[in-house]
Image (cartoon, helix red, strand yellow):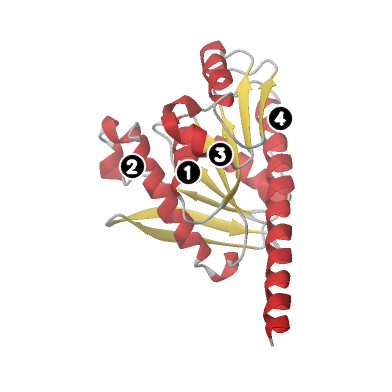
Amino acid sequence: MTQTIITRGSRAVSIPAGGVQLAGDLAWPDHPGGIVLFAHGSGSGRLSPRNQFVAGRLRNAGLATLLFDLLTEREAADRHNVFDIPLLARRLVAATTWAREQSELAGLAVGYFGASTGAAAAITAAALSPVPVAAIVSRGGRPDLAGNALARVTAPTLLLVGSRDPVVLDLNRAALTRLRGPRELVIVPGAGHLFEERGTLEAVADAAAGWFVRYLEMAQTWRGARGRNDQSAAAGAW
């Protein structure tokens, strides 16, 4: 599981969220076409090798990435916090607001990549965020844990599940019917819950990159067109 990663810039960051500081790693290629924030699964964080791999593939596809810890070390020691979806979602919303204030990321469309319980946090955050979320990708996720937030999410959502993960696959099939926006369920052949099998994580990374590039670029094109129309309307008023 090796790859050459194209990165123009990177820096360690500290993100304020609800009275705590969350450690993160921000990286971007030349002229990024969007920013993807990672919501890690239970017991995982910004150093997750699987999400690091996916993030590298996304940067090679022209996207900026922000991997950060949703919990502090002290908070993570309490297993209740690991499964507190509303708390994790609020942290993701705070990180999204922070990201849009960074000079490297100004004006970029936002996407969420969630794994395991992080998928529920991503969907819940998308329903709450004042910053529009242009696309969501779930890897082996538990979108069902997002509850009623599923019906409030209109962002294009891709659910990636291994064929050898039957319980999670059934939960994703049920969650798919409750989402309102463009949505797709992709079953990765031969993959278990952690996508440890040869080639399966690469398949996830490629599918995620394609989804994000498509919808983040579409969002930025729409936003640019709206901005030009607003300028034209303002000029016409004179």
Q: CA distance from mark 3 to mark 2?
A: 21 Å
* Category of crowding for the residue at label 3, using alpha-carbon neighbours closer than 10 angstroms: few (below 14), some (14–19), many (at least 20): many
**Which residue is depicted at the point 71% across and 26% down?**
199
Counting from the top left corner in percent of width and height, residue 76 is at: 31, 38
Depth check, mark 3 against mark 2: the one in front is 2
**Which residue is depicted at the point 57% across and 17% down?**
169
Q: CA distance from mark 2 to mark 4?
A: 30 Å
Depth check, mark 4 against mark 1: the one in front is 1
The quadrant of the image that shows the N terminus is top right
Residue at numbered disc 4: 203
* Category of crowding for the residue at label 4, using alpha-carbon neighbours closer than 10 angstroms: few (below 14), some (14–19), many (at least 20): some
Q: Earlier in the sequence, mark 4 or mark 1?
A: 1
Residue at numbered disc 3: 51
> Pointer 4 and pointer 3: residues touching (CB < 8 Å)?
no
The numbered mark at residue 87 is: 2
Residue at numbered disc 1: 127
Q: Earlier in the sequence, mark 3 or mark 2?
A: 3
Depth check, mark 3 against mark 1: the one in front is 1
Q: Is residue 156 visible?
A: yes
Q: CA distance from mark 4 to mark 3?
A: 13 Å
Q: Is residue 12 visible?
A: no
- Can you say whether 192 is above or below 129 in the image? above
